[in-house]
Image: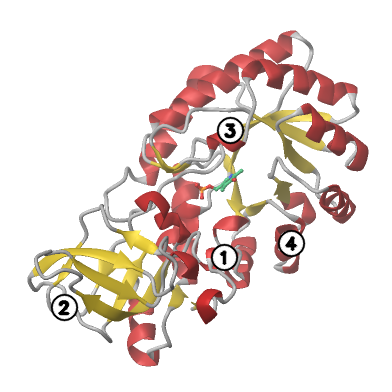
Amino acid sequence: MTPKIARFLAEQQPATPCLVLDVDRVEQNFAALRAALPLAQIYYAVKANPARPILERLVRLGSRFDAASHEEIQACLAAGAAASAVSYGNTIKKVSAIRSAYAAGVNMFAFDCAEELDKLAAHAPGSRVYCRILVTNAGADWPLSRKFGTTIESARALMLRAGELGLDPYGLSFHVGSQQTDTASYEAAIGRVAMLFTDLRDSGVNLRMVNLGGGFPARYRDDVPGIDAFGRAIMRAMTEHFGNDLPDVVIEPGRFVVADAGVVSAEVVLVSHRDRNDPQRWVYLDIGRFGGLAETEGEAIRYRITTPHDGGAVGPVAIAGPTCDGADILYERSNYRLPMALACGDRIELLSTGAYVTTYASQGFNGFAPLAEHYI
Ligand SMILES: *Cc1c(COP(=O)(O)O)cnc(C)c1O
């Protein structure tokens, strides 16, 4: 938690549950990323947190944007981004959204199949297109791969076809999965992409861009490699495979830019002993899976939690949300331990909740309002 957030929580005591996000930390993370990968063009993945103050700060810093829908593109433009700085990175796009993006001046589109390529040729003629290939998501706590991406063989045929359709075959992309903790996953994917570059060059198609996607991890409960380690591994692999003939390098970080800039402040609603002989207490918070903590599904993302009793004796807990849905359990098997003194009415904090939280909140399930947000 940054000092600014700590002061805001102490002085304002905002109603819970709420997210408090320090936009200066976003700027620091962006700077760290830029230092780790100075040759890369950074396209912030808007879905991680599309709040206006974040987008405006990133516009000022010269970021570009990876948007996934008409609405996200509009949010970028409204925050001051140039249309030429927006990539339409979703491989699944409504025709109406392709048309509106094209009309607004967006000139870079992702695809991963012939059917989507035909839509782009028809509704965004002449645009730069890049094909997403399927790579392993091993090492990622929040994998994405099965839904997106195609094989190297198909990508080859599709990039040839892109040119025939009057589009500009710009490059290739992949995504190694979100919260990726293994730097080697980027190196393996870069090797695959580089082979296809060479292959297509022999067929007369000169690709100019490699999009490494996102995936750079935030620190939650467990340690992760620092961003510099990812930068070194990526640049080593790019140099090994492309030599002095480096293509444009694009990255699309989401989580890394915003996660540790935010803290959710929540209230303990109930601490119960469900069975007298079970040492595991159940701790119910006023935020749960439906209040925005969707990434606790499968206990995949394990947030660090701080309480007013830290330093005292702890014991095992299960942690759940306030709704009447049985799926609204955050952690039951991940060996969370919280202070024995924890009690109803305590205010606790879930750390590094700036990414993939606010927009996952439901619209009033059980009457609970979506998560309040404070950008400071
Ligand atoms: C979600 C997403 C990202 C951002 O991923 P992070 O793991 O948050 O960095 C980048 N690119 C695409 C295409 C995505 O879908």
Q: Secondary structure at mark 4?
A: helix
Q: Earlier in the sequence, mark 3 or mark 1?
A: 3
Kindly identify which numbered label has been placed on residue 359.
1
Cα distance in 3D space between marks 1 and 2? 30 Å
Locate the N terminus and report the quarter of the image it occupies.
Answer: bottom left
Cα distance in 3D space between marks 3 and 2? 44 Å
Q: Secondary structure at mark 2?
A: loop
Amino acid type at circle 2 is: His
What residue is shown at x 47% (from left), y 40% (from top)? 143
Is the C-beta separation of discs 4 and 2 under 8 Å?
Answer: no
Q: Secondary structure at mark 3?
A: loop
Cα distance in 3D space between marks 4 and 2? 43 Å
Q: Secondary structure at mark 1?
A: helix
Q: Dot 1: few (<14), some (14–19), or many (≥20) neighbours within 10 Å?
A: some
Cα distance in 3D space between marks 1 and 4? 13 Å
- Is the residue indicated by label 3 positioned so its CB lies within 8 Å of ligand 1? no
The residue carrying mark 4 is 71
The residue carrying mark 2 is 309
What residue is shown at x 51% (from left), y 25% (from top)? 189
Q: Earlier in the sequence, mark 1 or mark 4?
A: 4
Q: Earlier in the sequence, mark 3 or mark 2?
A: 3
Is the C-beta separation of discs 1 and 4 under 8 Å?
Answer: no
Left or right, 146 with reference to 270: right
Amino acid type at circle 1 is: Thr
Q: Earlier in the sequence, mark 1 or mark 2?
A: 2
Kindly identify which numbered label has been placed on residue 174.
3
